Image: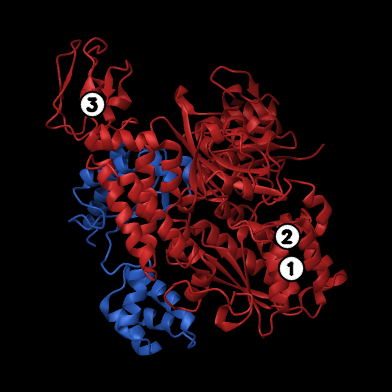
Chain colours: A blue, B red
Amino acid sequence: MSDNFSFQLWRYEGEPGELIPLLQSAQNHFGYIPRRAIRYISGVTGIPESDIYGVITFYSQFRLRPTGKLHIRACDGTACHVSGSRLIIETIEDELGISVGDTTEDGLFTLHTVACIGCCSLAPVIMINDETHGNLNPASLRKLLRKIRRREERTEVTASSHGR
Amino acid sequence: MDQMSLLVCGGTGCTSNGSLEIRTALEQELARRGLAQDVKVVTTGCNGMCGRGPILVAQPEGVFFHSVAPEDVPELVEAYVIGGKPPARLLYTEEQRGPVIPKMSEVPFYAKQQLIALSNRGIIDPENLEEYIGRDGYQALSRVLTTMTEEEVIDEVTRSGLRGRGGAGFPTGRKWAFARAAVGNPKYVICNADEGDPGAFMDRSIVESDPHAVIEGMAIGGYAIGASEAFVYIRGEYPLALARLNLAIEQARTYGLLGENILGTDFSFDIKVSVGAGAFVCGEETSLIASLEGRMPEPRVKPPFPAQSGYMGKPTNINNVETWANIRHIILRGAEWFSSIGSETSKGTKVFSLVGKVNNTGLVEVPMGITLREIVFDIGGGIPDGKKFKAVQSGGPSGGCLPESKLDTPVDYESLTKAGSIMGSGGLIVMDETTCMVEVARYFVAFTQEESCGKCTPCREGTKHMLDILTAITEGRGEEGDIEILKTMARNIKATSLCGLGQTAPNPVLTTIRYFRDEYEAHIREKRCPSGVCKPLISYTIDKEACTGCRACAISCPVTCITGERKLPHVIDQTQCIKCGMCFDVCNFNAVRVE
């Protein structure tokens, strides 16, 4: 367990209400909630692992598997839905060759759907990490994903040519 | 003359359309021309007309620019800031080539609105406390703490007729009175900002554009019921709102507007922010409290109500963001003023997120009692692309779909309920002839089925069975009698579920059966989707007569199943077609048919 994570945990003051913030900080730290974090939180708080697992799986925010570098959240709110979000989700699946919930083999993209981003005026909308992209259609979406993939490949090449 | 200010919209919609780049470009252009001292550039909260973003408003003239791109900035500065003539192509027009409407106050989208909860939107920088104070900010709190008793505050709110804006419409003053009268110490105040309805973003926008209004309302509520600790339970999907709220709370503490001995009185009050983890059921009061306490957010039987036994078993008062944002105006301008707005039973205004198949999408605040038709057609500007209006959906997964014949329903709690929908928290989703109402019902039931906490069997199992039947109908496997089974199940789920989620989950199904039964019957009996949405029931074909052989469809087809020579009619290979509808969307000659 890295020091940084334990440090965040020590803010725990023994109030049961802190379980969700603890899980959120674990997820911020690791990108998901690994088994060892559950064990660790259980040890500190005295809440049984099974109860923690129950809370994790109840909320849609928490993930038990790592995500890729770029986390795509495709909105399937009502406005997006009537504006064709199903087609948007299918296009992402087709373009990246993965299904909702999966990560691409290169670890670059993970795809999830979300109930609503609250950006309904720009429907259909997706979020890639914290950036929102709206008014999408399958063609513009494919272009966007290809552009991002090219950008990422370039950064990787630059990084490795610097010997990193 | 007043100094010119350029107000760049910094709401979530406009920022994702690149408004922050506009701001940078403006600052650079003004600096380049030596105007940086003369013209102020301000980032504001959401202006509401998100569909036309990025929005830029020039004060003091109130000129409204929309869809501004960084390339437009030099011309805008040259022509307007220096020359005083706004470039026509950035101004609003009702239809293409229609007359331009330069003033924001005259744009029809804004003209019929009346702003109370959103009165600071697009005017102040939400990250600057002094601008809020400049708009009478914290005066209501000051008046309450120095000149009013707790009872007087509750009396004022009660007489204003304000009802809960989260959707259920319980009178706010009465709620406060219960919490004040309850025995127990300490008492708590909670702001429900866990805006869970898909298709709704009123609360996100209020927090983003005017976070101090929410804080001030909560502090007044805390004083009235005798609480000194408070929580905001905010959705995790709203990073910008969360950041602005945290900043505003910090600022309020620094200025002594939160914390110990506020404004030198013996009233102390502070707010903690709790980030929700994504569960729709947390919108229900007792679930939200369970979640704050770190438990599984399952609702429990009421009574006892949170006013008697809430957070940690103590008296707790929960109101929604929009309700809190109204409080300071009621204190400053009085209960009589507030209750003079609206209808007989529903006072004041309501904020709606107007989205879906409507020309002007965005956030609107309208007096209660206005009709749905005025919102959809006058403010919303009607349906795009000459299509026909089919339904307007209010109340999210708990609400219903109202047809053309109900468009003259006045917007108030009672009228919407009578028509079969509910007020809800404020999502208004417009649907046109290309929306399948059976599929919409399936969509909402899929949502509630997923979000059911599982405590009550009728909600957990019943929504699952309803979803199975609805899915079968949309896939062409519907049977005679399905509609009756759905109606029976809907009645039972409504009657036997504990909380609002289950009690209202069947509403979208019931209203679509009530108003659009013919669509259900077409799916079941004729295995046909009249709106051309349900994939297993439709096929795309190309009309030989109309096709010009332009190849637009063939190029766009993701599975390359459209073939044909240039300038000759094309053909879709039905065995390969994935029914994505791309060809239908790109055809300029209406040659692609869906049936």
Secondary structure beneath label 1: helix
Q: Nearer the viewer, mark 3 or mark 1?
A: 3
Q: Chain of mark 1?
A: B
Residue B327 - label: 2
Judge the density around disc 2: few (<14), some (14-19), many (≥20) Cα neighbours within 10 Å: many
Q: Nearer the viewer, mark 2 or mark 3?
A: 3
Q: Amino acid at mark 1?
A: Ile
Q: Chain of mark 3?
A: B
Q: Position of residue B194 (x, y in %)?
A: 51, 62
Tell me the quadrant of the picture where the N terminus of chain B can be found. top right
Report, in whole angstroms, how far the alpha carbon at label 2 lies from the one at label 1.
Answer: 8 Å
Report, in whole angstroms, how far the alpha carbon at label 3 lies from the one at label 1.
Answer: 60 Å
Tell me the quadrant of the picture where the C terminus of chain B can be found. top left
Residue A140 appearing in the image: no
B490 or B473: which is nearer to us? B490
Secondary structure beneath label 3: strand
Label 3 close to label 1 by CB (< 8 Å) = no
| Residue B408 vertical placement versus B366 (above, below) | above
Q: Position of residue B275 (x, y in %)?
A: 49, 68
> Residue beneath label 1, please?
B220
Residue A137 horizontal side relative to residue B255, left or right: left
Q: Which mark sits nearer the N-terminus, 3 or 1?
A: 1
